[in-house]
Amino acid sequence: METVILAVVIAVVVLGAIGGLVVSGRKKKQLPPSPPAAPSAPATPSVTAPPAEPHIGEEAETPHDEERRTIEEVGLPEAAEAEVPTVTPEVPAVEVPEPTAGRLVRLRARLSRSQNTLGKGLLTLLSREHLDDETWEEIEDTLLTADVGVTPTQELVERLRERVKVLGTRTPEDLRALLREELLTLIGTDADRSVHTHNGIGTNGDEIPGVVMVVGVNGTGKTTTTGKLARVLVADGKSVVLGAADTFRAAATDQLQTWGERVGARTVRGPENGDPASVAYDAVKEGIAEGADVVLIDTAGRLHTKTGLMDELGKVKRVVEKHGPVGEVLLVLDATTGQNGLVQARVFAEVVDITGVVLTKLDGTAKGGIIVAVQRELGVPVKLVGLGEGADDLAPFEPEAFVDALIG
């Protein structure tokens, strides 16, 4: 019996030892590996450190033990007086246009390059040994192609035939002199081609600036011509105020103001789509107040087929005349439009009293005969011609210089 009890005790002890070893092995596997000991570090007593202050970035400074202050106690740094740069508004330089005297002569080379087709064509035909009916028909066709017009062409051909028959022998110099004389007769040299800008007498008896209205359909270069005319007048020593009465085109108003700024002329403008007559009235009023020499009014370039809008143009003139007389009404025509330009001229003349014509784009066409045709149609002279895109390419029309350029 004792032997059995002893065997049971031994078995329990063995099982207990084996269980302890297993539990001890599991605990050793769960523990993380201990960090290596610092070499030869002196033993220090274990002290619990306070949590470190949170820092931003790796270069954060070590916090200092300072007495904390309230926001009222912290003074703001004194702001240094900032230097404000002085901005000077850019004022466009005022240009000094070249004198108008002899300007057409200076532009003669440009004019002759485009116009000598007519002159050379006529001289070539007249130089033929036998001037038969067929040749005279060719001369007539050449003149008609140049937009001289039917009646003026017939008159010129008749005079040439008669004078050539009397002349007999024809040298090139004789023919050139003959053609020059007849063309000058056709164009006319006695007309007053000056732009009337003299001061008028107002309705109250006081002196007012000379008033010039510029009319014409869209696309003829009317607004540009008004700006160039301002340069012509400034070049002749006159002070100018511009009236932007083409209120239906904002671009036209801006364009006119730019032209005025270049020569120091002020532009009176109104709201977009405003009353053109009101703007024209205000422009003359400002011109009187400033003591200006001339007021130029750029009107709306309406199609001549729209009767109501043409009546509006007549209204502009009537409203301006409440200040005093309008000294000049210039009709701007495109020299390239030919006979269609005559239709425009006729309709405008029915609405306002045209006193002179400005022919633009004369440098790009061989149809210089339109000068003769439009003068016959309106009974008024061509006063200015546009010979290019340059600012000073608007020239007073001089028949002698024009004919000389025409025949070379």
Image (cartoon, grey):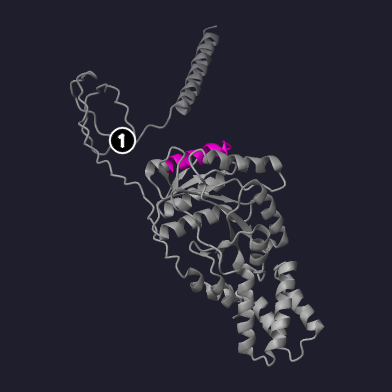
- Quadrant the N terminus occupies: top right
> Which residue is pictured at 63% across the width and 58% down the height?
333
Figure check: 89 above or below 29: below
Circle 1: is it few (<14), some (14-19), or many (20+) Cα within 10 Å?
Answer: few
Where's residue 176, x and y in %?
62, 84
Dominant SS of magenta comes to helix
Q: Which is more toward the observer, 11 or 66?
A: 66
Q: Which residues are magenta?
A: 270-287
Figure check: 93 above or below 370: above
The residue at which mark 1 appears reads as: 37
> Which residue is pictured at 51% across the width and 19% down the height?
19
- Quadrant the C terminus occupies: bottom right
Residue lying furthest right? 134
Figure check: 377 above or below 6: below
Horizontal side of 105 relative to 160 (left or right) equals left
Figure check: 357 above or below 295: below
> Which residue is pictured at 72% across the width and 47% down the height?
305
| Magenta stretch: includes residue 271 | yes
Query: Is residue 247 among the parts visible in the rendering?
Result: no
SS under mark 1: loop
Q: Which is more toward the observer, 149 or 44?
A: 149
What amino acid is labelled 1 in the image?
Answer: Ala
Residue 374 quadrant: bottom right
Residue 166 quadrant: bottom right
Q: Which is more toward the observer, 307 or 242?
A: 307
Where's residue 331, x and y in %?
60, 54
> Which residue is pictured at 28% across the width and 37% down the height?
38
